[in-house]
Image: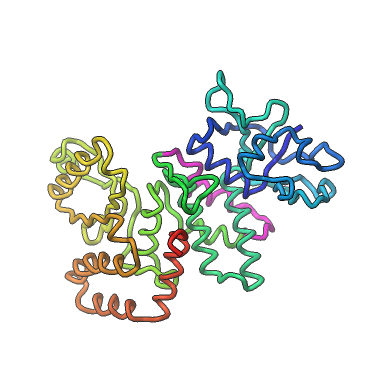
Amino acid sequence: MNIFLDDRYSLMLLRAAAGKSNGLALESCDYMQPEALSLRYFRQDRLGISKLLGYMYVRDEDKLGIVVPCAKNRIRSQRVDCRVLTRPRGAKPFLRLTSQDKENPSRLVPESTGVYVMSATNVVLGMAGRLSKLVRTDKMTHTKAKLMLLKLCLELCGTYTHDPLNPHTGKVFYRTMPWLDVKTLVNELEKDGREAGLALAREVASMAYDNSGSPQESLMGPALFFPDLYGGLQLTEFSANESLALTPDERQAIGGRTITPDFTMGKYRSVVEYVGEIHNEGENPQIDHVRSLDYQTLGYREFRLNYDDVRTRSAFMKSAARIVHVIAQHEGPSFTKRFVRLGSSKEFINRQRTLFEVFRPWLR
């Protein structure tokens, strides 16, 4: 028997596999659409995945989210949330749950039941559908829904992942392999379709970028560079996690190294780096020091922000003021006046508050 999990439980196992929790892993498979459950009467204890359900905190009274290929395959039970997924997107729309160490398999991977999760694109689309429903029923603004989906996209396209069981306050796993990249996401969402969240997913995919390294870094991009409609300061055009385009002479001057800033403001020859806790580990302080020297050699101004610099909105605005001061030297006093005007606008403050609450829900 095979079980195909919905977007909520798929995201949980994507995070678990990225963080290598309990030895779990996910591997590619050839399924192009889900299979219907072979059970006539649904009972969780007959699925053969009791340990996995325990890990995911799915109790007998909870609803397990699964997907089926068509409406006639839906199981009508109070213990299952059964959704129809007719046309999953992507060349490999599902991944099979397996063990990281095949010789010592995880106890959470069932022997007789295949457990399959949605690919990252289909998780994004599923979550977009849920958020779109909240917008339609006036339980959430469209802007907040976009920010929440953007946060998910930056994680799935990034090199970190949240705790699968406690994404708000649990441990963050760093230097993970991305499940997705923005180009793939955009391409897989281009196909015609009638999914409930397709329009929202397409909007957000055009805003996302690759290789965000931490939750704080994911906040900084929108906060510094997105339009004020989303609570951002829209300081200038930027690139995220892209290597500097150096001339042969510049590359030789820094020993042939490649430098990839968190954010680059090319017009002002400046970069922004977020220095999180991981930068204090091992050789990272020395690596950071060398990179700072390289920026000086290349004539780039470096803005280094740490947790205290973005801990609160007021702290963030003080940090941003340093960047504004440099840009104003090029753009004139009107740039500073705009920054001050935003900082005193109740409408902008509310939008910025929403941005911070979405990306940092543990501080509510």
Residue 190: within the magenta?
Answer: yes
| Residue placed most toward the observer, 188 or 67 | 67
Residue 192 spot, x, y in % from top left: 65, 55
Residue 228 spot, x, y in % from top left: 40, 72
Judged left or right of residue 41, residue 111 is: left
Judged left or right of residue 2, residue 225 is: left
| Residue placed most toward the observer, 98 or 328 | 98
- Residue stretch rendered in magenta on the structure: 176-197
Q: Residue at x 42, y 64 (%)?
A: 356
Disc count in the image? 0
Residue 53: within the magenta?
Answer: no
Tell me the colour scheme of the image.
rainbow
Judged left or right of residue 70, residue 56 is: left
Residue 99 spot, x, y in % from top left: 57, 28
Res. 10 image quadrant: top right
Q: Residue at x 45, y 55 (%)?
A: 208
Q: Residue at x 58, y 70 (%)?
A: 140
| Residue placed most toward the observer, 91 or 84 | 84
Q: Residue at x 53, y 33 (%)?
A: 22
Res. 118 image quadrant: top right
Quarter of the image where the N terminus is located: top right
In the rendered image, the residue lying farthest to the right is: 40
